Image: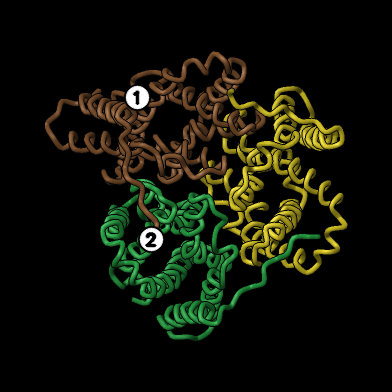
Chain colours: A brown, B yellow, C green
Amino acid sequence: MPDLPPLALIPFIDVVGTFVFAISGTLTAADKKLDPFGASVIAFSTALGGGTVRDLLLNLRPVWVQEERLLITVFVAVLVTILFRGAIGKFRRTMFLFDTVGIALFTILGMEKALRLDVPPLIALVMGVVTAVFGGVVRDILCNEIPLIFRREVYATACLAGGAAYLLMRLAPVPPGVPVWIAIAIIILIRLLAVRLKWAFPNLKPEE
Amino acid sequence: MPDLPPLALIPFIDVVGTFVFAISGTLTAADKKLDPFGASVIAFSTALGGGTVRDLLLNLRPVWVQEERLLITVFVAVLVTILFRGAIGKFRRTMFLFDTVGIALFTILGMEKALRLDVPPLIALVMGVVTAVFGGVVRDILCNEIPLIFRREVYATACLAGGAAYLLMRLAPVPPGVPVWIAIAIIILIRLLAVRLKWAFPNLKPEE
Amino acid sequence: MPDLPPLALIPFIDVVGTFVFAISGTLTAADKKLDPFGASVIAFSTALGGGTVRDLLLNLRPVWVQEERLLITVFVAVLVTILFRGAIGKFRRTMFLFDTVGIALFTILGMEKALRLDVPPLIALVMGVVTAVFGGVVRDILCNEIPLIFRREVYATACLAGGAAYLLMRLAPVPPGVPVWIAIAIIILIRLLAVRLKWAFPNLKPEE
């Protein structure tokens, strides 16, 4: 089945990603002292906001509007986070790893979706990055903050680099199935190195 | 005509709801010292933002983009509010009642629209709540505030409870036409009791 | 070719408009001390946000999602702005003129697009104004500010006035091709006069 993207074959891959991002959203909402309803909206936005923006731009009905799976996943994640707050706090490092794997997977899944709709490659790359990072942007807007990724260490850039590599490998005689994993590895690697080595782009300076 | 939703038979029901929400939006804009153009945008977002977000998610062209009726309603509401500010201030209690009836009606109208597009029930429930409360969320984002409903007394939850009851009654042998009114009554009752008895969910706490 | 809108015949008109708005967005991002990625997102939103909101409301896939032209234009504009910051600072007056011509062109282009989809005239007018000014609204939301145009001198109102004149001229026996240029001239004139003569609507006052 060379036409099927290898990632889509992994069952529940989107459920796992949604679950992890929803936990992270609930923790943010708790920091903002929101109530359980507000926390659910923030968790939802963090987990599904990126894919929703992508699907609206592609003029599609978002996946979570068609199937209840993802909505229920967010709800369970919010409940679990509220009930086991203390325990989750101890897994910050694991959460970070999940988040990193999550943005890698979502980048490639988002690109694949756009490419299969015959969107031009560069725009598919943007759609991949949007899928991965725009949930966090929506979360920050709702929490009344300048989105973190506009000022933070290499994050969206890791997705961009991995996605660009994915596009290049499509042009080269690479066996099918391989580019996906290389691209994901690139994203994870850049993100881990960036955090470990405190990579950051210099911020622009206001004019004097 | 059992297939037609009873609410849609009431003429101008959406015009009345839009009018009330647009007045409330204009009052908010005045508190923020916006100019008449800003006030119109805020009034518009408050009144039509919820339905617009729902329709974008359902991949439909929003109703106000197809018919001028609702746009003109908002414009008239802004004018009336600017001209008769003092008088409207005296009707705060009436406004509150209208607002409460408004979110009840919009919840059920939004659910009906989604259900008729064969959206799964749980997601139709979300679409109903979005229709009712997201106008306020868009308004607060434009006014640079953390959306009020994320921190406020039982508001969206009233819509959720009424909407859930509506879904359950569809499964039971209830005569057609009855569920709509029971659901609306539940939403209004919960909202009134919540305000009167100062019900509120506890806010989540940031981690120490 | 009387069916073709005269403006669409001018090649690259959208590329030029996008380029100018993207420069202005990058300068805003620098004032906020964002990094290059954040600056790109802000430039992108400023330049293409208005047309994107319009196309989502019209239930279309935005133009920049279909063709790479506009995306690349934004990217080049960001690069140029970062590299030649000092020089661009000297062209503030030219930038202002370009911006003024830009909102005039975008208003009419946006209206034309909506009218050709058989959207009612008043709503086409709103779509034109949205095309012209909502990029700035999205930019300000992302930068965590109350959108400037809600409080600023006559800006969206100039677009409204020119757009309304355009609609009226369509009803009158004006030779085809003429209304476009008159409408654009009205928008530019009102905007220039407003800035020169410091026109402003009075802000609304909060209730005592």
Numbered disc 2: secondary structure: loop
Quarter of the picture containing the C terminus of chain B is: top right
**Circle 2 crowding by C-alpha within 10 Å: few under 14, some 14–19, many from 20:** few
B154 or A6: which is nearer to us? B154
Name the outermost residue toward the front: A208
Mark 1 vs 2: CB contact within 8 A: no
Residue tagged 1: A8
Pinpoint the chain carrying mark 1.
Answer: A
Against C30, residue B78 (above or below) is below
Residue at 27% across / 36% down in the picture? A163
- Residue A168 lies left or right of residue A200; in this view the side is left
Whether residue A168 is visible to the viewer of this picture, yes or no, is yes
Whether residue C4 is visible to the viewer of this picture, yes or no, is no
Residue tagged 2: A207
Across and down, in percent, residue C185 comes to 45, 81
Residue at 74% across / 27% down in the picture? B165
Q: Nearer the viewer, mark 1 or mark 2?
A: 2
For the residues beneath circles 1 and 2, the answer to whether they share a chain is yes
- Mark 1: which amino acid? Ala
**Counting residues from the N terminus, which is met first, the one under dot 1 or under dot 2?**
1
Pinpoint the chain carrying mark 2.
Answer: A
Numbered disc 1: secondary structure: helix
Corner quadrant of residue B88: bottom right
Against A93, residue C183 (above or below) is below
Against A97, residue C152 (above or below) is below
**Circle 1 crowding by C-alpha within 10 Å: few under 14, some 14–19, many from 20:** few
- Mark 2: which amino acid? Glu
Corner quadrant of residue C149: bottom right
Across and down, in percent, residue C178 comes to 42, 83
